[in-house]
Amino acid sequence: MILSILMLTFLPTLNAQVQPIHEEKYVLIGGIEQWITIKGKDLSKPVVLFLHGGPGSPSSPYSDAIFGQWEKDFILVHWDQRGAARTFGRNSPEELGEEYWIENPLTVEQMTADGIEVSEYLIEKLGKKKIIIVGSSWGSVLGVTMAIKRPDIFYAYVGHSQLVNPVEDFIQVYYKLFKMAMEKKDDESIKVLETLGPPPYDNAKNTGQLLRVIKKYERENSIPSPELWWKPAPGYDNETDAQHRYNGDDYSFIHYAGHKPLGIKPISATIDFLEESLNFNIPVYLIQGQEDLLTPLEITQPYFNKINAPDKELFIQQGAAHGFNQSVVDMHYKVLMEKILPIIE
């Protein structure tokens, strides 16, 4: 009887410690409403903030399929950045045109400030001391700048397909692609590359054409991700959300690549981590696909070598290219569980 009473006494306390969270809403960040989702099976678990790529390519519609199983171990946060998906749709006019693109620039500084504000919001809302940030491709730019600017609010930074110097990336990949196309006698790609000439380019269309050749060769030389990963979750699988994703991707890409005819300067030209952003006060773990052409290992490795951090490691995934596949996702999880969880207070 005494044991039963004790069990009943402590049962509410035990239940309170395993409280799930599932929240999807707009939050005022950087002066505009931005879309944030928070999901986890246990509020006591560490928080992971995903910084999606693109810019303009949200992870929120695909998060359940790719990362859903992690919810037992972490609180997972996905954020549609300024210029992406639902955040873009919430803040853009119905009639979009070149005038809107010109008058609403994107900058690394503004989006870094947004990311820090999102992080502070999560810490206060969820009662945490710090969080973990995971940045992929474009998101790795924000990950580096956020981690260096505010190490006091992050346990660690995990960078996937780390961007270091996008201008140099494109120059290197152009010549590498040309060699690959010549060896394969790929006349179609050779013609595209000859017409474009070597980068940098002064318009987004040329950059987009080069990216299509890059993706073609990455697909041919890497293990793909499951197709079901890229089917939007039911709440996002509708015409309105699809249009917001499309429009946001266009808007963000033209600012990333730059477009001289409209006077839009490229964000990509402002990024050079090899000359800066080398000193971290938190652990840094980079995950890189062996077949990644867009952010080549020839640039990522020298950057990693120059990084100063309390702990750092570079994980190279065979059979992976720039994007996610199963081995890349598995390595993310392994890094979180084996490298970062042991250092969390």
Image (cartoon, helix red, strand yellow):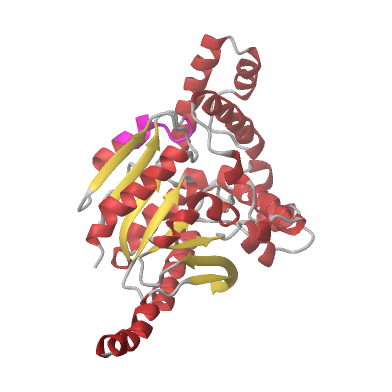
For image coordinates 60% across by 55% down, the residue present is: 61
Q: Position of residue 128 (x, y in %)?
A: 35, 73
For image coordinates 35% across by 87% down, the residue present is: 8
For image coordinates 57% across by 61% down, the residue present is: 82
Residue 189, compared with residue 128, is above or below; it is: above
Q: Position of residue 125 (x, y in %)?
A: 44, 77
Asked whether 291 or 296 is in front, the reply is: 291
Asked whether 252 or 123 is in front, the reply is: 123
| One can see residue 60 in this view | yes
Say which quadrant the C terminus sits in: bottom left
The reply, left or right, for residue 271 in relation to residue 253 is left
| One can see residue 108 in this view | no
Q: Is residue 294 magenta?
A: yes
Which contiguous range is marked in magenta?
293-301
Q: Is residue 63 magenta?
A: no
Q: Position of residue 142 (x, y in %)?
A: 44, 54
Asked whether 20 or 215 is in front, the reply is: 20
Q: Position of residue 217 (x, y in %)?
A: 54, 24
Say which quadrant the N terminus sits in: bottom left
For image coordinates 29% across by 50% down, the residue present is: 284
Q: Residue furthest right?
A: 95
